[in-house]
Amino acid sequence: MTTTTTTLTTTTTLAAALALVAVSVALVNRNRKLSKPLPPGPPETSFILGNASVFPRPPSEWLKYEALSKAYGPVSHIRAFDKHVIILNTMKSAVDLLEKRGANYSDRAQLPLIGDLMGFNWVITTMPYGDYWRLNRRALHQHFNESAVKSLRGKQERLNARFLTALLDTPEGWWSFTHWLAGANILSAVYGMEDTKLKDDPWIQLGEDTLQSLNVVTNEGFQLVDIFPSLKYIPSWFPGAGFKRRARKIYELQIRARERPFAWVKEHIASGTAVASITSALIDTEVDGVPLPEDVAKNCTGVAYIAGADTTLSAIKSFFLAMVRNPEVQKKAQAEVDRVIPADQLPCLADRDAGSLPYLEAVLREVYRKYPPIPLGECRVTGSLAPADVLCTIGIPHQGMQEDEYEGMRIPAGSLFVANIWSIMRDEEIFPQPESFRPERFLTSDNALDKNMLDPRHAVFGFGRRICPGRYFADAELWLMAASVLSCFDILPALDANGVEILPSEEVTQGTVVAPVQFHCRIVPRAPAKRSLILSASEQ
Ligand code: HEM
């Protein structure tokens, strides 16, 4: 009896949802006839589905979005059901809309699967634009702004010295040490965890697993529930409700990631053994004279934990890849570091302030440009129409609030935006020969950083009010690692059984955050004196 009733309720809900979509689509289409044209896009094949069949799907959707833009223009449009997706393929359009009109374009799509069922509603990245999001951003900004992150330099330098020591002792383990470096930096800054394990650290693993679970979902998923939210009420045992069972597992994972490290800090504060950290500071913070609510403190620390490591890790791995593939660039960067940093010192973050390593800055800009860690800027909107089912995977895009007009085109209220960072970073008008790794493109003829050249950090960390709050922290970590590795080691291609060099490919993993697929290389100390430098730095 209960089963029949639930089945009926579910069927009714589904039918009602479909009817609602049909009505909204009809309204959308009627409005379209009355006003300015939508941005150009492929012809719609169905009244209700729009052109869901052409929605780019993994792998490498950024290439498919780029192809759509090449066919239809730098600002183009596709639609699935009542969801309009606007593809921004130029820096100008991304800045014009997501930055200059940030008051209208800083909302996020609310996705029942990720938000309600998996429980990621607390993650700042998914929050709707409004006062609660603003309070969370303010709290994060207090600790991650450009000047605040300077107070974290000591921690970053200690961890970096440990990384260099690990490379010295076990160079063949370099790949797993990069995972440690990215995870350890976040855990130390955010929770004051100072002795994470170089291998199989459970805290680093928990953070990686949580982000990975999100990646998997946005990569594959049968996400009909995001289009018909009522489906979230169907019981887990119902045929086709596998997504609910899977969501439950991820729900438990993200709760652990948000709660456990926070509780760990509170226990250490209670026992008087806590090390100063962003969590301990947030627990004591007041905003406008009122103590910061604990849920906001947990949101901030939890989001940094799951969003801060894999992204930075991607840039670290890309740096190693770029160095192996471009030995002449590596030599030039080493020569600059050798010239500027005294032989008896390791580079430290204060050295960056002097601005005397422009070539290294240019190398890192080129790493960000050629290998953006989030190629679609959190804005993965993918999908396909198979004969029997609709697949539509939606990341966490910017969402517009009011209807708007841009260059004579109508941008409907509620549109989702895909800023194709990957493609913007390959715009030949700004970056000629975009596939070649050429740091010189960021330098003037007298080898200073060219202020007129677009700094890729302006795009790879996102846009406008939603721009990545962790960008200064991540960028400092990357710089320090790159400067000190270049100073102490040669990064060389691996050799095959015949002693022939193996050049790693540029293949990347798939997901919202992407990174080079695992490759081998040789990390060789440049001089015996570097060994004692590293050892004395790691003892301090
Ligand atoms: C190289 C490293 C990183 C890259 C490339 C990166 C990139 C991005 C991008 C593209 C966005 C989306 C912005 C948008 O929607 O326009 C974002 C958002 C975000 N990032 Fe990062 N990120 C990095 C590191 C970090 C770190 C270390 C943290 C830790 C605090 C962090 C925390 C966040 C948060 C909380 C958001 C959501 C902001 C919001 O929706 O208001 N990220 N990041």
Image (tube, rainbow, N blue to C red):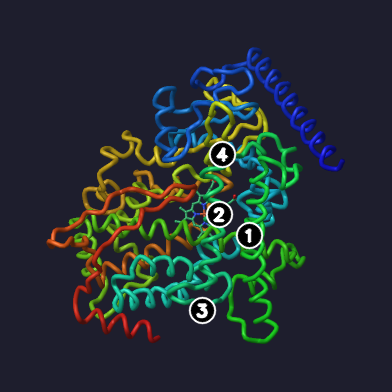
Residue drawn at point x = 42 percent, y = 33 percent: 64
Element on which disc 3 rests: loop
Where residue 447 sits in the image (x, y, percent)? 24, 53
Q: Which mark is residue 213?
A: 2
Task: Check whether the beta carbons of the residues at disc 3 and disc 4 lie within 8 A of each other.
Answer: no
Q: Residues within 10 Å of mark 3 (few under 14, many from 20)?
A: some
Image height of 92 relative to 291, above or below: above
Point out residue 490 in the picture as x, y percentages from the top left corner.
22, 67
**Foreground residue among 270 and 228:** 228
- The residue wearing badge 3 is 194
Q: Quadrant of residue 280?
A: bottom right
Query: Label 2 amino acid?
Result: Ser
Position of the N terminus by quadrant: top right
Q: Secondary structure at mark 1?
A: helix
What amino acid is labelled 4 in the image? Thr
User: CA separation, marks 3 and 2?
Assistant: 26 Å
Q: Which residue is mark 1?
A: 254
Q: Are marks 2 and 4 in contact (CB under 8 Å)?
A: no
The residue nearer to you, when weighing 458 against 274, is 274
Image point (75%, 38%), residue name: 230
Comparing labels 3 and 4, the label whose residue is closer to the camera: 4
Tell me: 415 left or right of 156: right
Query: Identity of the amino acid at label 3?
Result: Glu
Between the residue at mark 1 and the residue at mark 4, the CA separation in whole angstroms equals 20 Å
- Which tag, 1 or 3, sits closer to the chain's start? 3
In this picture, residue 8 sits left or right of residue 58? right
Q: Residues within 10 Å of mark 2 (few under 14, many from 20)?
A: some
Q: Which mark is residue 393?
A: 4
